[in-house]
């Protein structure tokens, strides 16, 4: 430790840094959500039956099923790796109304529903807006997922104007995948809790079997099979996410009464997290250093800037960012010394980033005493 405890006591700030929200999840989290489910029109391909009188489920016929309103709900458990990447396991349920069927031999009415359920594994990436200079409690994210869904139909019944009835039903499974685009909004005062909004596109194939098809006509009951083509769902979701490892910001340091004035050659100026602007208390300390330089024989005033190791951008990019932030803090102090009458020619500034902490800490720790500038009178 470069400075003695007595020196530290004379320069602690009374003001605490402003609270900030963590945008990168490290460790476990849970997520639930629900919203609107819109299913694209599906094509159904009917297998041969014994019907040969114009019934819509005769050999080789094809129909389109149009979907109406629907909803979706999901729950997931995931893990954040601290670098923006997340992986999660998700269970999902989808419901959709079916209200129309066309391209049939005669006109008819259709009113039913379908539903799907299953699980997917998702990989997502949180986009830290602080790397673009935006310190806001919003974190966009993108992701992809893959899994397996079971798809069941109503059954879906169509009543034709000629008195015939056709019904499609059954449950089959298939490979499913999805793309995710969304954003998380941190809730003030509740660390780890966020509201999420998402758009999801789910695609599903049906490779594990066909559905049953039954027709009732004056000629009797006729059974066959029907296969659906690729299915696409478009979903608009609102959710709630909680990350378990997020801790509240540390309490402000208690004010320390300054002892009686004594000659000093080193002064400390502290800064809020990710800030280089001077607080009123910081300006007062700079003014004291400027005044002291006029009462002792001073040849050089060394101004050294530092940061803590809780980089706004993790990894090597964060170290580079903190180095620049330490220089900006030193420049702010130099400008204030000049305004207080100190000649610019005697001021020498340096930025040391995360190195030489005043208080040793673990990685990625917001330590107010390490966010400082040292003014050393030589």
Image: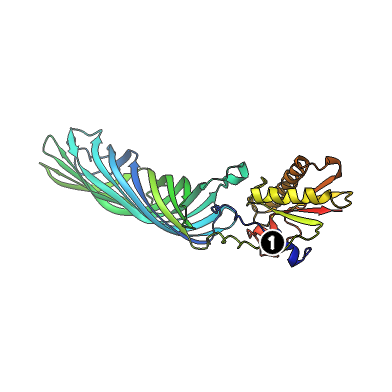
On screen, residue 320 above or below 55: below
Which one is in front, 126 or 331?
Answer: 331
Instruction: Using the rendered image of the protein, determine whether residue 252 is visible from the camera's viewpoint.
Output: yes
Q: Is residue 159 above or below residue 186?
A: above
Residue 150: x, y in percent?
34, 54
119 or 350, which is in the foreground?
Answer: 350
Residue 370 drawn at (x, y percent): 69, 58
Which residue is pictured at 78% across the width and 61% down the height? 262
Which of these two is toward me, 223 or 134?
A: 134
Residue placed most toward the observer, 51 or 182: 182
Image point (49%, 63%), residue name: 244
How busy is the neighbourhood of tag 1: few (under 14 within 10 Å), some, or many (20 plus)? few
Q: Position of residue 184 (x, y in %)?
A: 47, 49
Within the image, what quadrant is residue 40 found in? top left
Lateral position of residue 127 relative to residue 42, left or right: right
In the displayed structure, 348 sits above or below 3; it is above
Please state the horizontal and vertical placement of residue 308, each as a whole percent of the image.
Answer: 68, 57
State the residue position of label 1: 258
Secondary element type, mark 1? loop
**Is residue 60 visible from the viewing direction of this image?**
no
């Amino acid at each position: 430790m470069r400075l003695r405890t007595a020196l530290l006591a004379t320069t602690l700030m009374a003001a605490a840094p402003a609270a900030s929200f963590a945008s990168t999840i490290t460790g476990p989290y849970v997520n639930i959500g629900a919203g609107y489910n819109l299913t694209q029109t599906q094509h159904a391909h009917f297998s041969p039956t014994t019907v040969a009188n114009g019934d819509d489920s005769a050999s080789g016929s094809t129909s389109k099923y149009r979907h109406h309103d629907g909803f979706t709900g999901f729950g997931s458990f995931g893990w954040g790796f601290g670098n923006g990447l997340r992986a999660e396991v998700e269970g999902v349920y989808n419901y959709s109304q079916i209200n129309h069927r066309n391209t049939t031999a005669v006109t008819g009415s259709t009113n039913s529903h379908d539903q799907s359920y299953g699980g997917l594994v998702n990989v997502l990436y949180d986009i830290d807006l602080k790397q673009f200079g935006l310190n806001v409690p919003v974190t966009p994210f993108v992701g992809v997922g893959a899994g397996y869904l079971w798809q069941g139909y109503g059954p879906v019944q169509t009543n034709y104007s000629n008195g015939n009835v056709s019904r499609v039903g059954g449950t089959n499974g298939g490979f499913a995948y999805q793309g995710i685009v969304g954003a998380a909004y941190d809730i003030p005062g509740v660390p780890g809790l966020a509201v999420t909004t998402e758009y999801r596109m789910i695609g599903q194939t049906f490779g594990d079997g066909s559905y049953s098809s039954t027709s009732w006509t004056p000629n009797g009951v006729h059974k066959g099979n029907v296969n659906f083509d690729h299915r696409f769902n478009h979903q608009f979701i609102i959710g709630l996410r909680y990350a378990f490892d997020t801790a509240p910001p540390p309490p402000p340091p208690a004010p320390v009464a300054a002892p009686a004035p004594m000659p000093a050659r080193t002064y400390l100026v502290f800064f809020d997290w990710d800030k280089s602007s001077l607080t009123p208390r910081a300006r007062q300390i700079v003014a004291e250093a400027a005044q002291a330089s006029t009462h002792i024989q001073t040849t050089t005033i060394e101004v050294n800037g530092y940061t803590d190791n809780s980089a706004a951008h993790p990894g090597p990019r964060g170290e580079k960012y903190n180095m620049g932030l330490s220089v900006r803090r030193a420049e702010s102090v130099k400008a204030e010394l000049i305004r207080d009458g100190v000649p610019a020619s005697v001021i020498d500034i340096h930025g040391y980033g995360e190195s030489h902490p005043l208080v040793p800490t673990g990685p990625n720790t917001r330590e107010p005493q390490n966010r400082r500038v040292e003014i050393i009178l030589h």
